[in-house]
Amino acid sequence: MDEHQQPASNSQQSLRRQFVLFASNFFKHPKMLGSIIPSSPFLVRRMLGHVDWERTRVLVEYGPGIGTFTREILRQMHPDAVLLVIETNKDFVEYINSAYADPRMQVVHGSAADIQRVLGERGLGAVDYVIAGIPFSTLPAAMRESILDATRQVISPDGTFLLYQFSPNILPALRKTFSKVTREFEPMNFLPAHFYRCSP
Ligand SMILES: C[S@@+](CC[C@H](N)C(=O)[O-])C[C@H]1O[C@@H](n2cnc3c(N)ncnc32)[C@H](O)[C@@H]1O
């Protein structure tokens, strides 16, 4: 290091570690991740701006990756609320467990397709919000439908499914499964994101 270089701060090191973890997993599993970069703060803020934190007691997150949404959910959620996160990638499960340990959070290494069984095993009832960034367009059609059906069944009658995608291809399947679908668009993200709010 020359005399003008500063040692990297802890937060810079942590950001670098997160980026390397996410990007290296993108090269291993491009279809499962769908993006080389985690979601932007603009998208996170916009999606979570629709959550009624005061009344919410059960949240589910599908595909937290390195916890871009998870961190903000934990910051805002009620002290008595429970957050269940389900992630297929073991590296991300280990990272979430080590970086965001919180007694209100339960981390499951598995697929969103198993949501009904996982909630049942944990005695968790109807879900207020399911928040998802999993790349539905690269999933096999049967898997996509089964995750959407299971999601509709676990959400409480006044609950909401919030999801973002990089293409609008999911829209017909959402409209077929949910009674009401509202669309928004967030350009300040890599890649610009289509964002949906669905009622069961
Ligand atoms: C585009 S990344 C999103 C990461 C993070 N939520 C964000 O917004 O930055 C998609 C994540 O979904 C996970 N994933 C893909 N299919 C899944 C499934 N069926 N169940 C749970 N997680 C899944 C991937 O491993 C990856 O972590």
Image: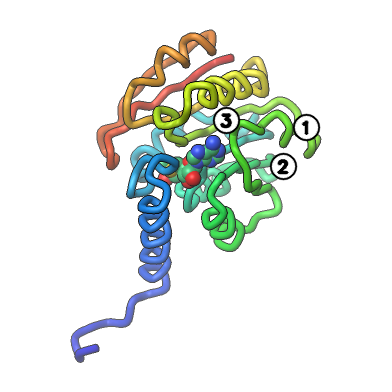
Q: Which mark is residue 120?
A: 1
Asked which quadrant contains residue 170, the reply is: top left
- Residue in the image at 27% along x and 34% along y: 192
Mark 2 residue type: Asp
Q: Residues within 10 Å of mark 1 (few under 14, many from 20)?
A: few
Could you tell me residue 36's position as x and y percent? 33, 49
Could you tell me residue 139's position as x and y percent? 46, 30
Residue 62 appears in the rendering:
no
Q: Eyeballing the image, is 172 above or below 68?
A: above
Q: Residues within 10 Å of mark 2 (few under 14, many from 20)?
A: few
Mark 1 residue type: Gly
Q: CA distance from mark 2 to mark 1?
A: 19 Å
- Residue in the image at 36% along x and 65% along y: 16
Image quadrant containing the C terminus: top right
Asked which quadrant contains residue 167, the reply is: top left
- Residue in the image at 47% along x and 36% along y: 134
Q: Which mark is residue 130?
A: 3
Could you tell me residue 145's position as x and y percent? 54, 20
Q: CA distance from mark 3 to mark 2?
A: 17 Å
Q: Which mark is residue 80?
A: 2
Residue toward you, 124 or 48: 124
Q: CA distance from mark 3 to mark 1?
A: 16 Å
Residue toward you, 145 or 185: 145
Kind of element beneath mark 2: loop
Kind of element beneath mark 3: strand
Image quadrant containing the N terminus: bottom left
Is residue 195 left or right of 150 when viewed as pictured? left
Identify the coloring.
rainbow
Q: Which mark is residue 87?
A: none
Give the label, 3 or 1, closer to the camera. Answer: 1
Residue sitting farthest toward the bottom: 3
Residue toward you, 11 or 119: 119
